[in-house]
Image (tube, rainbow, N blue to C red):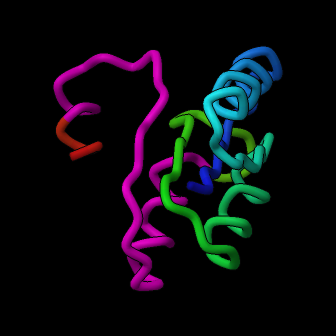
Amino acid sequence: MKILIVEDEPKTGDYLCQGLGEAGFVTDLARDGLDGMHLALTADYDLLVLDVMLPGVDGWTILQAVCRAGIEVPVLFLTARDTVEDRVRGL
């Protein structure tokens, strides 16, 4: 299984890559939204793990671009935001 992680916090991104790699997953890590969107639109992934607040392009915008491109892939959001509006938007 190939997973794209888009996370700008270095420790969090490295931790996710290490843990998922040790569990047998192949991971790519993008540290900003522009790189993440490029990878999400040009490579095949089985899962996207998106931070919501990213430099360049946020996680919501990456998901919109992926949907507009007709790419069907499960997405997990990483965020410290916890309002009902944010949760509903993520759904």
- The answer to which quarter of the image holds residue 43 is bottom right
Q: How many marks?
A: 0
- The residue positioned 40% from the left and 84% from the top of the image is 70
Quadrant in which the N terminus is drawn: bottom right
- Which region is colored magenta? 58-87
Residue 88 location, x and y as percent? 17, 39
- The answer to which quarter of the image holds residue 2 is bottom right
Q: Is residue 13 above or below residue 55?
A: above
- The residue positioned 45% from the left and 51% from the top of the image is 60
- The residue positioned 48% from the left and 29% from the top of the image is 78
Q: Nearer the viewer, residue 44 or 87?
A: 44
Residue 87 location, x and y as percent? 23, 32
Q: Nearer the viewer, residue 3 or 64?
A: 3
41 on left or right of 9: left
Q: Is residue 4 above or below residue 15?
A: below
Magenta stretch: includes residue 19: no
42 on left or right of 52: right
